[in-house]
Amino acid sequence: MSVNPGRLYNSVDELMKQFDTAVGKRFKELDVNHRLVGNGNKGVLGQIVEEGVFHYPINSDHNADFPNLGIELKTTGIWNRKRDISAKERLPLCAFDYIATENTPFEDSYVWSKCKSLLIAIYEYLDGMPYGEMMLLKGFLHAFTKSDIEVIRNDYEILQNKIKAGKADEISETDTNYLSACTSGAGHGKKDVTASRHFGIDLKPRKFALKGGYMTQIIRKILTKQEVESIIEAAELKENSIEDIITSRFKPYFGKKESELIDLLGKPTDSKNRFERYVAAMLGAKGKVNSVEEFAKANIQLKTIRLEENGTIEQNMSFPAFSFIDVANQEWEDSEFREMMTNQKFLFAIFENINGEYVFKKIKFWSIPDSILDNDGQKVFNELKDVLLSGNIVRGFQTQKDGKVIRLNNFPKSASNPYIHIRPHGQDGGDTNPLPVPDKLTGLTEYTKQCFWLKKSYILSVIKGN
């Protein structure tokens, strides 16, 4: 039974007209109950929208926020960096109940009944700006497509089957494609007492959430009217997972030499990216594989790997440049890097150089294991954060053979960690990001952009199945 005594909206049109009155306003203008005072927590933003826009009080009702319309309200931030719009983070939906998930079919699940129709309120997140100054940009009703529903059902059943198999403590965000069971906020380092007692193992509190990749795609479609290419039909997803469908499309090409691939698929016009073009043709994609709807929503990133005759690969794997200020202000569990990695899947398409000609050997879906991310990844992150907050960024200078003087820094190096390290990611030394604390040695307030890297030796071991 609903306990929401607030204003009743009798139609979707009436609901959206009410939201439109708040578009362009800052959260401080909508904060009727002063929730921002002394609170920098983004969690209050949804409450401010509920109270200040729709005029209903905060409650613990388990029904959708607008029960007569069957619509749940969610508030989320976006990045708008160099015209590249993306979701700031995953979108939490509701609590993850281990016991109910084990015993309830997807169609009857709490998460589906509550969240099958969403009103999503978008605001733009800006570095260093108080939440009160941030502005509501748009609200939109989101209904899941038939293909989305099939993928989300499969994700739910993956989590359900893991619980049934006695592996509830092994649940990871990398298990699924669109819908995840994430740990966040108060769940970090704590225990779901009821579930732990029921299953006899320590289990973390979790929430159902829509992954960041999925949110980015639906937000881009709303804000930019961007249409993206789809390569999988909803009917295919009724019987098979995204991974199974993709694998089946590659199978006819395993073991083919590059000359044979050209005969079958045609010669790529762009020789520099020819291996990516082979992969796209195998999948039936006309454009870039990483821009295909299913890849983008599931945050699957294609990496073509060339394994040379001497058994090596050429490059370490880089990620987007990070904000020094963000790293300094984040805790590991809620860091942008951790969320990115827990939601990132890779598709390695492996071409091996055999007798001077590349052969398409195999593919491999892979995500970094939680055990490595939350140990070695956390160690690198915390070392980096300590360096930034202490101001001990530059440790000295070195003159190269050509007479150029370069700076040496204290960021975690490749030699100190077998998996992850920090290296530059700017176009040149002048491509910088602000520092949270001026460097003690030089007084610099900005430094060359950096990013996290995975070591090529680790990637090679993954490819070889070690």
Image (spheres, rainbow, N blue to C red):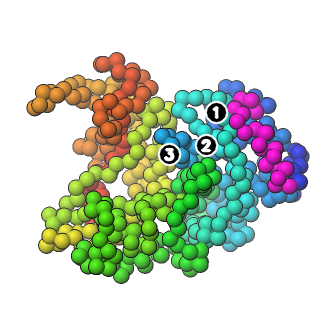
Q: Which mark is residue 134?
A: 1
Residue at image position (65%, 66%) is 145
Can you say whether 397 is above or below 201 in the image? above
Q: Is residue 463 magenta?
A: no
Magenta span of residues? 11-31
- Spatial separation of the CA atoms under disc 1 and disc 3: 18 Å
Q: Amino acid at mark 3?
A: Asp
Near-viewer residue (417 or 393): 393
The residue tagged 3 is: 84
Where is residue 178 shown, x and y percent of the image? 56, 61
Q: Earlier in the sequence, mark 3 or mark 2?
A: 2
Q: Horizontal placement of 41 versus 353: left or right? A: right
Local crowd at mark 2 within 10 Å, few (<14), some, or many (≥20)?
many
Q: Foreground: 219 or 227?
A: 227
Q: Is residue 228 left or right of residue 197?
A: left
Residue at which label 2 appears: 77
Q: Residues within 10 Å of mark 3 (few under 14, many from 20)?
A: few
* Residue type, numbered disc 1: Met
Q: Helix, strand, or loop for circle 1? A: loop
Do the residues bearing badges 3 and 2 touch, measured as CB atoms within 8 Å? no
Q: In the drawing, does residue 2 fall left or right of residue 195?
A: right
Task: Report the Cα–Cα distance between label 3 and label 2.
Answer: 14 Å
Of labels 2 and 1, earlier in sequence is 2
> What residue is drawn where x is 73% and y is 69%?
108
Instruction: Choose between 119 and 114: the one closer to the eye.
Output: 119
Residue 392, percent from left and from top? 33, 25
110 relative position to 465: left or right:
right
| Kind of element beneath mark 2 | strand
